[in-house]
Structure formats: C-alpha cells, structure tokens
Image (cartoon, grey):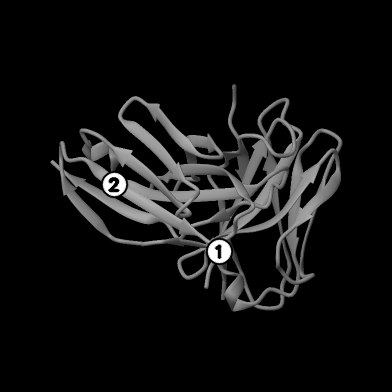
Amino acid sequence: QKEVEQDPGPLSVPEGAIVSLNCTYSNSAFQYFMWYRQYSRKGPELLMYTYSSGNKEDGRFTAQVDKSSKYIYLFIRDSQPSDSATYLCAMSAENNNDMRFGAGTRLTVKP
Amino acid sequence: KAGVTQTPRYLIKTRGQQVTLSCSPISGHRSVSWYQQTPGQGLQFLFEYFSETQRNKGNFPGRFSGRQFSNSRSEMNVSTLELGDSALYLCASSLVSWDTQYFGPGTRLTVL
C-alpha cells in the first residue's frame, strides 16, 4: 500500500461546478499538507499549504485536512476551464523535506 | 524575481550513457530538492541539498547522485542509464530546508 493514495481520474466537470479532490494517507507522522497544480509540460505550482489539521481558504480554493480519518481535500468553487490541470497532493513529516506525493488527479473543466 | 530554471529542457540519451542535469534555484534560496516524475510512479523524491550538503535522500540506487555549489546551483547526475530512467526530472528550491518549495519546469530525459 502506498503512503499516499490519490484517484488519478480523469475527472471532467462543467464550468461553474464545485470540484472535490481528495487524498488519503497512512503515515501518522505527516504534518505538512500541500496541493500542487501542474499544467501540461510544466512543473508543479504550489496552490495550498496547510500545517496539521483544519481548513484554509484562498479565493476559490479551499484545503481541508482531517487527521482523524487521514484524508485531505481540495475544493474548487466556480470552476473555470483554466483550472484544467493535474492536481497533486503532497505531504511531509515535521522537519523532513522528503515529501510524498499522490499520483495526481487529472481535471478537465468544460466550457 | 526569476523562478527556478533547469537545463537542458529536453535530453535524449542511450542506455549505458551518463547524464548531468542542472538547476538554478530562485535567488536567495539555499535548499534544492530533486524529484523524478513518471506516469507509473508519479513524483518521487530523489534528494535534497542545503548549503552544499545532502540532507535527505530518497529510495533510489547509487547511480543517481547530486551536488550543490556555493551559489546554491545544483546538478544531478545519473550514470549507466537504463530505459526506466526515462522521466521528467524536477528541481524545487526553497529558502531553507523544509520551507515552501517552488518547482522548475523540469528536464525531460528520454533513454533509448
């Protein structure tokens, strides 16, 4: 079993829809949780960063960490065609730069 | 501020050869991490350098090595290339070890 599991999709939604992405993990030591967006032929771009549990909101994006169930979530409100990309979750233990990534979920937002 | 740059962007090599990839971090960033990205395995951590010292290493064979220079630029070397080494190699920099990482565009290596 991988440390971080993420459904690769693909996920296709109409413009304006609310998108829900998630990852599950097995390592209780993970404290830092991140979501990256990767466009085709580009490097990953940090979207959201959360320490420990809780929610974090930034514009149309909301990141949520539920350590009790070992799930993290990324919600995208009012999705746009420009949100079409692969979304990667990543996590790391305290003071450890050895990040573990999910497989990435490919999202397409149709106009 | 300029982002992370990686050279070359594309590379084609044959089995048994060796390759060196280069990464220039964001100005002022002292930590550089390397990752391998493949469709099957996703993003996997290779190693991290901070102040010219390797601080963390992922689970890759010794054919994969790296170094960091005093100006924080980093190089990654892969010796005796195998077909399975074909991947996108990404470099990420951060101010200090364990801080928000910023990725470069990657070097796409194809091994024939």
- The one nearer the camera, A65 or B42, is A65
Which corner quadrant of the image does residue B65 belong to?
bottom right
SS category of the residue bearing label 1: loop
Q: Position of residue B89 (x, y in %)?
A: 59, 56
Mark 2 vs mark 1: tell me if same chain.
yes
Position of A84 compared to A53: left or right?
left
Q: What amino acid is labelled 1 in the image?
A: Glu
Q: Position of residue A54 (x, y in %)?
A: 46, 36
Give the mark count.
2
Residue at which label 2 appears = A20
- The one nearer the camera, A5 or A46, is A5
Q: What amino acid is labelled 2 in the image?
A: Ser
The mark nearer the N terminus, 2 or 1, is 1
Which corner quadrant of the image does residue B104 belong to?
top right
Q: Quadrant of the C terminus of chain A?
A: top left
Residue appearing at x 78%, y 36% in the figure = B72
How far apart are the two marked residues, 2 and 1, measured between alpha carbons? 21 Å
Q: Chain of mark 2?
A: A
Residue appearing at x 20%, y 33% in the figure = A78
SS category of the residue bearing label 2: strand
Residue at which label 1 appears = A3
Position of A11 compared to B80: left or right?
left
